[in-house]
Amino acid sequence: HQQPLGSHLLEARAHSVFSDQDTSYTTTIVLVARPSTPRGAIDAPSTGAVVSGVTDVRGWALDETSERDAGVDRIEVYLDGTLAIQADAGQERPDIAAGYGPQFVRAGWGAKVDLRGASPGSHQLEARVHSTVGDQETSYFATIVVGQ
């Protein structure tokens, strides 16, 4: 069973078969909450990709400390620092579940970003993810090139 957070006394006892004596060794340990550990990536388009029009942006996001699900409740996609769209979360990613655990099978996300108003050249995509476990945001980036 799980122990409460805080200070605890840990004791190991050894019994000698030669002397029939018991010896105890003790130390104090402190249990702390596991820190929130968000992970993720923008899978597509990849950094350096030349894109135009309405472009599919896909990736994954999770908080490793979540025990029930992906542990994220919001993924926003930004273009050059400006909110472009709220991503659709909860998409199946068996590959992520295989690497991180079965509770993360729905760690995928996707969005369609309209690049028709963006000038040709280099632009930064950002996926800003909010963790429900640690109540913090983490960002993942890809630099894309908008074509003519």
Image (cartoon, rainbow, N blue to C red):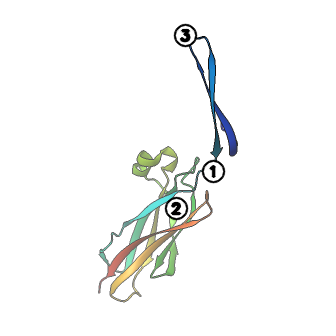
The quadrant in which residue 28 appears is top right
The mark that comes first in sequence, 2 or 3, is 3
Q: Is residue 1 visible?
A: no
Task: Return the residue found at the far front.
Answer: 19
Dot 1, crowdedness within 10 Å: few (<14), some or many (≥20)? Answer: few
Answer with left or right where residue 28 lies relative to residue 81.
Answer: right
Q: How many residues crowd mark 3 within 10 Å: few (<14), some (14–19), many (20+)?
A: few
Q: Which mark is residue 33?
A: 1
Secondary structure beneath label 1:
loop
Q: Which mark sits nearer the N-terminus, 1 or 2?
A: 1
Q: Choose between 7 and 120: the one closer to the eye.
A: 7
In the image, 2: left or right of 128? right
- Discs 1/2, front: 1
Label 3 sits on a secondary structure element that is loop
Marks 2,3: beta carbons within 8 A: no
What's under tag 1, amino acid-wise? Ala
- The residue that appears at 62% across and 15% down in the rendered structure is 21
Q: Measured along the vertical axis of the image, is residue 73 above or below residue 125?
A: above
Between 29 and 43, the residue placed more toward the observer is: 29
Residue at 54% x, 10% y is 18
Rendered image: mark on residue 138: none
Residue carrying label 3: 18
Q: From where the camera sits, is residue 135 visible? A: yes
Residue 89's disc number: 2
Residues at marks 1 and 3, CA–CA distance in whole angstroms: 42 Å
- In the image, what residue occupies the spot 39% across and 85% down? 116
Disc 2 residue crowd, few under 14, some 14–19, many 20+, Cα 10 Å: many
